[in-house]
Every structure is written in C-alpha cells, then in structure tokens.
Image (cartoon, grey):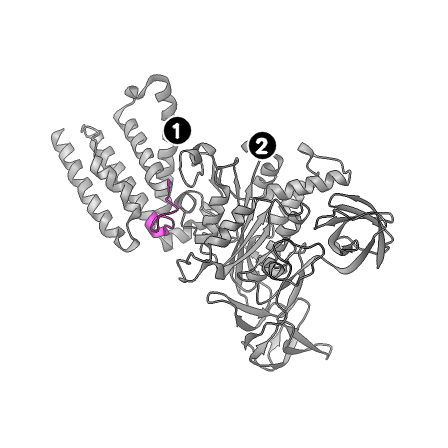
C-alpha cells in the first residue's frame, strides 16, 4: 500500500492514498524511508508520527505501509544491548554508519545470524500451550533465557533437540489440534502498545530490595509495584534511579532514558560494566537492557521508547523473572505527546497537555504487576515500574505529576534543599509515602525481624515530632523545650544524618541489606529509649559525644562485623546511662 505526502509539520506527516490502513500501523516515509506510525485517521487523510528527523522531506514524496504495528524483536541477545527508542541497536549502527544515525537506517533489534546453544526442557510427545517453556539459552552468566511457546499456539511436540541455533531457526516442531505442523523459533515479535498476556494478576507481597535505607525502611516499593520520583532540576532523580538500577534485587533491569541528557545515559554505560551485582558477583550490565532516547534524539520517538522498554520488560516477566523498569523521565514523554497533540490541532487540556494524558500514563503504569504467567506451569513473575517526573520548577501540581500520583502507590518526593545540603538520597521523609507497607509487613516480620515495622513506625514518629518542635524553636528558642523534647530533636538528627543519609561512593554504605538496616535503626532507637528512661528518672540529658560518633560510623562497618560493633556500642550506652542515673 502506497500513499503520497500532503503536509510536513516537524515530526507530523500527513498523507493520502492509504485506504484501508489501520491505526498504529508502521509506515516508511519519504525517499529516505523514515520510520513512522499512524496516529490519526480522518477521511482519506492519514496522520503519521515520524520517529526520525524529517528535515528535507516534502509533499509529493511517497509513504509505504509496512503492514504491521510498531513491534519489537524478543529473544536471545537483548541483555547488555543499548537500543534507541524503536529498538535499533546503537552499537551496530555505530559500527556500520559511524557516530551519527543515518536517516531511514534499518537494523534488526537482534542478531539473526549468531548461534545460541539451545537446551530443551520438554520432551517429544509433551502437550504444550502458549507461554510454556520448551527450552533454555544461557545468554549471560546471570541470565538464562527461557524459550516460550508464542501466543495462539498449542499442541504436542513432534520434534525438539539440543543444539546450536540462530533465532530464526526452528528449535521445536509442534503438531497443532488441526493436525498441522508448526515450527517454533527463538525469535518472537510483539506490538509495543499491546500488553503481553498473563493468567492472573496477584497482590504484591515482597519488597523490591534496593539497598537504600530511606526507601526500604520508610517508603518501600513491592515487586510488581509502581513508584514515582518527582522533583526539581538537580534534586537527584537520575541519581536515585541509577542506584535502584545498580542495587535492587530485580533479576532484570530495563533502563529507559526518555528525553533526558545524553551524559546521564553515558554514566550508565560507563559505570555498569565495572560494577558488580552484590548477589551474583557478575557485571551489572549482564542483567541490563538499555534504551537511549536522549534529548538530542527525535521528539516523537520518546513515546515509542517507553513502550519498547515495557514490552521487553514484560517478555522477561513472562519467563518468571522479577523485572524492574526505570523510566527517566515520563515528563519528556508527556511533552512529546503535547507537541504531537498541538500539531494535530486537538483540543488542549490543562497546561496544553492532551486530554488523554491521564489515560496514557495509566495504561503505561498498569502494565506493571505481579502475575501468574501464561502457560500450564503456574510460574510467577513481576514487573516493577519506577518513573521519574520532571515538573517545571519542581511544581508538584503539574498535570504529569498529578496524573502519575493517581496511579502509582509509592511517592518519593525529592527536595532540592536536601540535595544542596549533600543529603543523599534527597527524598523528603515528611512528604513521601508508600501504600505497600501493609502488603510487605508479613515478609519483613518473617524474613528480617518481627519488630521491623514497629521500629519503622517509632522512627517515623520521631521525625514527625521533630518537624513540629522546629516550629516552636523558631518562635521561642530551644531553651523553652523540655529535656524529652530536646531528646527527640537529637534523635531525629541522628536518624537524618546517620540513617537516612547514605554515601553512594562508599563500598559499604552504597548498598545496605535489610538486616543491616534493621540493626542500625534498632541501635538508634535503643540509644533513644535508654536516654529517655534516664531523663524521666531525673537524670540530665548528657552529651554522649563518643557514642554519637560511633553511631555515625557504624554504617560504614562491614556487614559481617556489624553485630559485634553494635553489641560493643550498646554496652557503652548501658554504662553511660547507668552513670547518669547514679549521678541523679
């Protein structure tokens, strides 16, 4: 099917003569064959969103239908690859064309010639259905790709054997119910705007362990959960997402750089190959898929990049993995939608964003979740989505922030004031919240400590009391406070500076296990309760300078030495408190 361009307006191209074309179908635009997607049908006029630079394209040039919606290639070879927003591997383009992406360049998402060692997990004669795993390919030292029966296929295995295959080779032959033989390849293709099928969505019950104390202890996100990180420029959104991508206990990380600066993606590319996963000891890049659609790339491709990323993430979720997707940032995606909506002359909503902004954001985040995967095996997988939002001037009333907050269940509010004080992560403990605390309470009690949630509540109460007492101090001075109130202020300061603050460049403090987090918080509360008991019995507050210094340093102690160090500090606390009580 071929049409003719009638109008070009930036990334929007209008054409006629494409009778019978469908919404979201891919097309090739102009003599260069630029990649585009149909986004509006109005009579015989077709509106096309072009994912490449349209400079030089003019009316009269041809538009050719590809016949399929925008889809991604799924199979061995995804891990460790960096793609652009429409799944073109940038390293391959660089090797073929140099540092600049040529217009209309067509490179497949996966290497179709490379051979992979396929090991069957099903035998001849086994009955299979869509989603069943028939074999495995070891893609990296940490990731085993599970080769699944594609959607819409079921039957009995006629032929399957171990060997070296390309993703285009048939690794299995199935006899369907109609009696026909169907070849199964390792390569699957899936439309990015269509969520992959699953059997059942489950309630999240396990935390996504990030190693960041302010997140894991106070505002946790569950595996299969959704989280939002809004904040002004320079408050550390990207830094937080980098930390989550580095240290969270997800099996697979999909990192989407959507419209942000290129140096932020460069940091990921430079750091990840050299950092080691604390669980496997292997390079972090060996469990990561990177999608780079930075601010100097075409605007329209930002929308494609988030869908490309979440489709790849769903593919690994369907294998039974716990997957985490980082989207940095959804504001740039929303701005791209606003630009396209304006060029289509649609009725604008709040601040010029399209009226369907909220529904598009909801559709994206609703693809997260913990699910029972398709197939007869009953395996479960999860997809957690963490989206950064960059509201202008840090204004949290921005439509993108508000639309996101209506969907997600975790809100990490970043404050530039904390970032300028070098407090990392710069997450506000007073404005943030998590609705997953009750979901993961059982996990924390059975796997970490029975009093974990109770200690969290006690620490949060101290931090909230500090905020109220600071108002009094501003009005009448600290001398007007009682000893117990001064003790609250001192303890809150210890919590802020020694627990919530984390040193990203210290090998011991950049990642903190749940067990160590509980021990550190318990020690601070032990110190607080001992001093409070002494004050109530008439003893002075006391300086305890050496103990406070020890509390500040214990987070840098190696994990296997923490228990001994804490026991030593608790003995010193007991001794000093006993002396204070004796002097009273």
Label drawn at residue 249: none
| Residue 569 in view (yes/no) | yes
Q: Locate residue 45 relative to residue 390 in the image: left or right.
A: right
State the residue lying farthest toward the front: 98
Between residues 315 and 46, which one lies in front from this camera angle?
Answer: 46
The vertical placement of 129 against 579, above or below, is below
Which is more toward the observer, 525 or 384? 384
Residue 442 painted magenta: no
511 part of magenta stretch? yes
Label disc, if present, on residue 467 of the rendered structure: 1
* Residue shown at the point (41%, 52%) measured from the top left: 442
Q: In which quarter of the image is the C terminus?
A: top left
Say if 367 sits above or below 95 in the image.
above
- Whole-percent x, y for residue 458 in the image: 35, 38
- Relative placement, left or right, of 122 versus 550 is right
Label 2: how many residues lie within 10 Å, few (<14), some (14-19) or many (20+)?
A: few
Task: Tell me how many marks there are.
Answer: 2
Which residue shows up at 18% across the image and 36% down it? Answer: 577
């Amino acid at each position: 099917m071929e049409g003719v361009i009638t109008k070009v307006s930036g990334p929007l191209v209008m054409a006629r003569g494409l009778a019978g074309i469908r919404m979201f179908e891919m097309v090739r635009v102009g003599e260069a064959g630029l990649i585009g997607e149909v986004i509006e049908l109005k009579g015989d006029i077709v509106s096309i969103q072009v994912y490449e630079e349209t400079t030089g394209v003019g009316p009269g040039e041809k538009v050719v239908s590809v016949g399929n919606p925008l889809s991604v290639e799924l199979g061995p070879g995804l891990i460790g690859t960096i793609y652009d927003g429409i799944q073109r591997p940038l390293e391959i383009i660089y090797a073929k064309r140099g540092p600049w992406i040529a217009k209309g360049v067509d490179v497949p998402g996966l290497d179709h010639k490379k051979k992979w060692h396929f090991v069957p997990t099903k035998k001849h004669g086994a009955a299979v259905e869509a989603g069943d795993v028939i074999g495995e390919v070891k893609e990296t030292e940490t990731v085993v790709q599970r080769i699944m029966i594609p959607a819409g296929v079921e039957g009995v295995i006629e032929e399957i054997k171990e060997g070296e295959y390309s993703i285009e080779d048939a690794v299995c032959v199935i006899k369907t119910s109609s009696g026909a033989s169907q070849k199964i390849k390792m390569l699957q293709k899936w439309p990015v705007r269509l969520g992959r099928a699953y059997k059942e969505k489950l309630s999240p019950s396990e935390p996504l362990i990030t190693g960041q104390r302010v997140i894991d202890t106070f505002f946790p996100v569950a595996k299969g959960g959704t989280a939002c990180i809004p904040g002004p420029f320079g408050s550390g959104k990207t830094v937080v997402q980098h930390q989550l991508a580095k240290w969270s206990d997800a099996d697979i990380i999909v990192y989407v750089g959507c419209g942000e600066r290129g140096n932020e993606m460069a940091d990921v590319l430079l750091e990840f190959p050299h950092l080691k996963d604390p669980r496997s000891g292997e390079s972090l890049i060996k469990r990561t898929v990177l999608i780079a659609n930075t601010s100097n790339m075409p605007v329209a491709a930002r929308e494609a990049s988030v869908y490309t990323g979440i489709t790849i993430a769903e593919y690994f979720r369907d294998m039974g993995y716990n997957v985490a997707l980082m989207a940095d940032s959804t504001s740039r995606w929303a701005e791209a939608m606003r630009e396209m909506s304006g060029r289509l002359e649609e009725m604008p909503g709040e601040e010029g964003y399209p009226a369907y902004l909220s529904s598009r954001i909801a559709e994206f985040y609703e693809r997260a979740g913990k699910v029972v995967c398709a197939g007869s095996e009953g395996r479960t997988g999860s997809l957690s989505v963490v989206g950064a939002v960059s509201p202008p001037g840090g204004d949290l009333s921005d439509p993108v922030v508000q639309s996101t907050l209506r969907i997600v269940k975790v809100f990490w509010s970043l404050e530039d004031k904390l970032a300028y004080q070098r407090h990392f992560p710069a997450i506000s403990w007073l404005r943030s919240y998590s609705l997953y605390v009750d979901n993961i309470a059982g996990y924390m009690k059975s796997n970490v400590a029975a009093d974990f949630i109770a200690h969290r509540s006690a620490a949060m109460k101290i931090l909230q009391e500090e905020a109220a007492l600071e108002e009094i101090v501003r009005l009448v001075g600290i001398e007007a406070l009682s000893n117990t109130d001064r003790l609250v202020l001192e303890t809150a300061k210890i919590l802020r500076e020694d627990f919530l603050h984390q040193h990203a460049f210290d090998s011991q403090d950049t990642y903190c296990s749940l067990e160590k987090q509980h021990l550190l918080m318990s020690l601070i509360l032990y110190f607080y309760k001992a001093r409070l008991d002494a004050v109530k019995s008439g003893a002075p507050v006391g300086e305890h300078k050496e103990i406070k210094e020890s509390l500040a340093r214990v987070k840098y102690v190696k994990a296997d030495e923490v228990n001994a160090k804490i026991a030593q500090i608790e003995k010193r606390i007991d001794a000093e408190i006993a002396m204070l009580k004796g002097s009273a």
